[in-house]
Amino acid sequence: MPKIVVLPHQELCPDGAVLEAQTGETVLDAVLRNGIEIEHACEKSCACTTCHIIVREGFDLLEQSDELEDDMLDKAWGLEAESRLGCQAVVAKDDLVIEIPRYTLNLASESH
């Protein structure tokens, strides 16, 4: 079973975490199932950038992003070459190391 290593994030996961993931599930589903509350304002429909992650290890092992995801990522805060949307990055057989960016752009949030 692949693992996802989540690097420390000041608010969401201060100590970092090592999570068991299931092949074929999205990174977002895996982290949410393990209690790490990454924002996902569009309910996982690839219509925002709130679940933006940076894949520090294992990026090349993921399926390539499609045009819709790439278009959304262009709007993400802190975009890097290894950026993906957690709702679109599907776990394969290999382990991943991810970083949750410090900030996210959420134009739909009513709590801000």
Image (tube, rainbow, N blue to C red):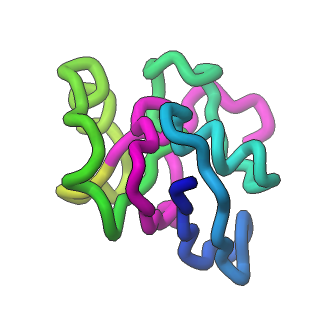
Residue depicted at 48% across the width and 62% down the height: 101
User: Where does the magenta region start and end?
Assistant: 84-112
The image shows residue 1, relative to residue 50, as above or below, that is below
| Residue 32 figure quarter | top right
Main SS, magenta residues? loop
On the picture, is 56 further left or further right than 35? left
In front: 104, or 82?
82
In front: 79, or 89?
89
Quadrant (top left/top right/bottom left/bottom right) for the C terminus: top right
Residue depicted at 45% across the width and 46% down the height: 52
The image shows residue 20, relative to residue 70, as above or below, that is below
Residue depicted at 56% across the width and 37% down the height: 106
Residue furthest to the bottom in view is 15
On the picture, is 92 further left or further right than 15? left
Q: Position of residue 3 (x, y in %)?
A: 55, 61
Does the magenta-highlighted stretch encompass residue 75?
no
Residue depicted at 72% across the width and 64% down the height: 12
Q: Position of residue 53 (x, y in %)?
A: 44, 53
Q: Position of residue 76 (x, y in %)?
A: 36, 44
Quadrant (top left/top right/bottom left/bottom right) for the N terminus: bottom right
